[in-house]
Image (spheres, rainbow, N blue to C red):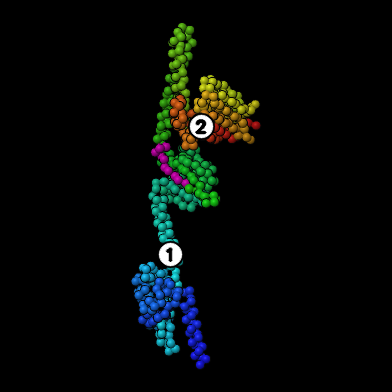
Amino acid sequence: MDAVESGKGDAALWRLTLQHSPIGMALVGLDGLLMMVNRAACTMLGRDADTLHAMTFQDITHPDDLETDLEQFERTLAGEIDSYRLHKRYLRPDGSVLWSDLSVALMRDDAGRPLHFISQILDVSEEHERRAHLEETVAELERERSTLSAIFDTVNVGLLLIDADGRYERSNRRHRETLRLPFPDGHDGRAGQLGHVYHPDGKTLLTQEEMPSWRAADGEEFDDFLYWVGDDPLTRSAFSTSVRQVRTPTGERRGATLAYQEVTDLMRALAVKDEFVASVSHELRTPLTAVLGHLEMLTESEDLTPQVRRQLDVVRRNALRLRSLVSDLLHVAQAHAGSLEIERDSVDVVCLVEEALEAAGPAADAGGVTVVADLPDALEALVDAQRLRQVVDNLVSNAIKYTEPGGETTLRLGSVDDTLELGVHDSGIGMSAAEAAQVFTRFFRGSGALDRHTPGTGLGLTIVRSIVDAHGGTITVDSEPGRGSSFHVRLPGALLT
């Protein structure tokens, strides 16, 4: 009697446990009928117990999962397996789908005869949605990767990615093709390898520190660095390279990207143009010299009437202006061809600047501009006096031209260690950031110059930069519309101690 009562108590406890389990539980007949379901299963399946008791598991299984479920069901009944587990879908009355993790085991009596199945259902819908979203994201990323990879290898621009240590991480087809000319014996895959890489003059080899990849690995960013590659001048190619640093969201540098654009035709066309300009300039200088010489002789004559003398002065001024323009064109052509010669000598820079300011005095007076000079007592430097005078003349002349009457132009000369420093600031019309970025480009003239009809060719600052570059120095500009412009020249190693 006690055993019977105990058995009844165990059965009641078991049913109570099943009903309150958070996991969906069901007893399934050998024909698939749902004999018993707990509350969790009812909630998951969206039906009450009475409704489910009148249904088979086949009735509520998604059609696409039914065949697999039945196959495992039959194998278990046949004794091939004791249990099985499936990732399957159930259909709810409202048409929604329950994604579940189903575990099924066959219960047998003491004689081994099948009694019923016990099924355990876990709701994994949220997990499935997360997995589906992840798979969709991965698939989208893979599509984007494939697209970018195709573009990466299709564009006619060499692309290279290096890591923070200068190792080549990835390059495209075009870049690999460009390596054959400068590195016929192969490349070691690290930044700065020396090869047949030349300056725009086509004669001087780049040092390791000048190689674009080395500069990129060193943290630099730049645009349109021009050079030639290849040992044979007849078959070599020209490239323009730009570099951008790659950083993590926290700002840590993780490498750099380099873009290589072939510009051989452009470079050869520019070379032909520069040769033409240089040739024409040379041809013009000779007759201009003769014209100016004869003008000097004519103006020395005492028999000239005032009207004729005025006319000769007009001719002389225009001839001098034309000679200045020819000289500028020749200078620019020489600088672009890499043939600009610098003859360094010991120069009193203070005296040179004072002479330049004295020469600019009449223009400043005519424009109502005050020129202020902040000069040391003496400053000796090893520079090309004639070229440096051109730098000062151009900077001061521009400052005066673009300053309104009543404004001020300031020139400061000084030194830091062995570096000569020259600054010219004006309170004039200023420039936008976009204009300042192009101000050293040949023939560029800002909108302010055009609006004011200020005379000029757009070559002055190009000449200034070429002279500064030839001295191994740098020139920078700070400007803002309506606030004036400041040009800063630095010539490292120029001072004599």
Q: Which of the labelled discs sits on residue 129, or is there none?
A: 1
Q: CA distance from mark 2 to mark 1?
A: 59 Å
Report the residue at 56% width, 30% height from top.
424
Q: Nearer the viewer, residue 361 or 318?
A: 361
Q: Residue furthest top?
A: 303
Query: Residue 430's spot in the image, x, y percent?
Result: 50, 32
- Residue 203 seen in this snapshot: no
Disc 2 marks which amino acid? Gly
Q: Earlier in the sequence, mark 2 or mark 1?
A: 1
Residue 31 to residue 286: above or below: below
Residue 9 to residue 266: above or below: below
Q: Quadrant of residue 31?
A: bottom left
Q: Nearer the viewer, residue 482 or 296?
A: 482
Query: Residue 71's spot in the image, x, y percent?
Result: 36, 77
- Residue 49 seen in this snapshot: yes
Q: Which of the labelled discs sits on residue 482, or is there none?
A: 2
Q: Secondary structure at mark 1?
A: helix
Q: Quadrant of residue 98?
A: bottom left
Disc 1 marks which amino acid? Glu
Q: Nearer the viewer, residue 71 or 33?
A: 33
Q: Which of the labelled discs sits on residue 292, or is there none?
A: none
- Within the magenta stretch, is there residue 265? yes
Q: Which residues are magenta?
A: 258-267
Q: Secondary structure at mark 2?
A: loop
Horizontal arrangement in the rendering, residue 64 relative to residue 376 (left or right) = left
